Image: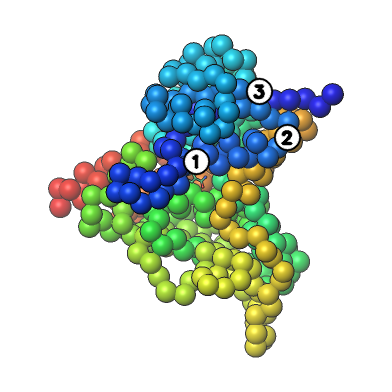
Amino acid sequence: MAVEYRVGIIGCGRRPGPGPDGRMRGGGIAENHAKGYEAHGRTRIVAAADISKENLESFQERHNVPVGYLDYREMLAKEHLDIVSICTWVGLHSQICVETANSKPKGILCEKPMALTLPEADAMLDACRRNHVKFTIDHQRRLGRPFGLAKELLQAGRIGELLRLEGYVPGGNLLDWGTHWIDMFFFYQDQAPVEWVMAMADRQTDRSLFGVEVEDHSITHYQFRDGVRASIELGVPIKGQPANRLIGSEGMIEVGVTNGPNVRVRGRGDRDWEVPDMPEGIHGAVHFASSVAELVAAIEEHRDPRNSGANGRQALEVILAGYESIYRRAQIALPLEITDNPISRLIAAWRAS
Ligand SMILES: NC(=O)c1ccc[n+]([C@@H]2O[C@H](COP(=O)([O-])OP(=O)(O)OC[C@H]3O[C@@H](n4cnc5c(N)ncnc54)[C@H](O)[C@@H]3O)[C@@H](O)[C@H]2O)c1
């Protein structure tokens, strides 16, 4: 008989529906995890935990979850879970992940960004390794078909030698959204190591997201050890730029073109873009279902998931190097040696200036 996996969710998220201002808003990210487990067929959410009774009960009701806990530790101790989703804000990821790994599930699916510091990330990796837990950081887009197609076109030599990667995110910041494109660039680059990072940022507001104060606008520029350059601009909207651009010696590929196709490719001498058939978009719930399926496959095939914790750490290191570069106004060499989170130093410096 096919194995059925007992799943527990930590951090059920805000309820979808009208917010305090009456406008409709989506639910928390646990909503997408739940849909992923529901779509899988061999995973069953048997329990959920949240410190907010309201968020917990409304999640249980929407997803038919029989048991709820206000303390995730109690859930871990009682439920003999096979898979645990960690859907809280970033500041809690490390502590919850370590405790969850020590309860020895088969797999953990933890939201991005991985953690606030490298020692936190290392503690997560270490706890999962010690307890033989397959560990995913939810960079779900890496499993998406448009990005996979871009990589196939690259590997097929359609744009010659890769020289440069660009990423754009209107409204995003380096920590929360930058993590997706930094991870994606590692995907295109087969996890090639990064040599240095140089970044710049501006903050005019008192913006914070998921409990972390962040910049309004940043540009992060970095170099892989194989000489490929990458740059990611986040925050202030920019006209006419795709989500990802891969520039090669013989052409370029664009992914997520604003008001345009999901993927397009053009050789150096071509007059027009070639637009391969790619109905799947670059956002959407389908990628979360892929994260669930990938974690189950990794458990059954005794391998790491493609969006593994180790890959999550690589992205975090570039992010932290970016903030350190902004703080020191200098290029930062990797491996990164700092053990704290430079964002708090940076915010203090901005406040003092
Ligand atoms: N992968 C993606 O594309 C993607 C998209 C959006 C958000 N996220 C990430 O998901 C995470 C959560 O975002 P969200 O929008 O769901 O936030 P949210 O605020 O809607 O949900 C967080 C939930 O965690 C609960 N919580 C807080 N402390 C807890 C504790 N100690 N134990 C149990 N529950 C606790 C809160 O009560 C809340 O219900 C963030 O890290 C965010 O970056 C990822």
Residue 251 in picture, x, y percent from top left: 64, 77
Mark 3 belongs to which amino acid?
Arg
Is the residue at mark 3 in contact range of ligand 1, meaning its CB lies under 8 Å from it?
no
Secondary element at tag 3: strand
Secondary element at tag 1: loop
At x 39%, y 33%, the residue is 91
- The residue wearing badge 2 is 41
Is residue 38 rendered to the left or right of residue 229?
right
Mark 1 belongs to which amino acid?
Ile
Is residue 151 rendered to the left or right of residue 30?
right
Rate crowding at label 3 as few (under 14), some (14 to 19) or many (20 or more) other CA atoms within 10 Å.
Answer: some
Secondary element at tag 2: loop
At x 71%, y 71%, the residue is 276
Which quadrant would the N terminus be assigned to in this image? top right
Relative to 138, residue 272 above or below:
below
Which is nearer the N-term, disc 2 or disc 3? 3
Q: CA distance from mark 1 to mark 2?
A: 20 Å
Mark 2 belongs to which amino acid?
Gly
- The residue wearing badge 1 is 29
Which image quarter has ligand 1?
top left
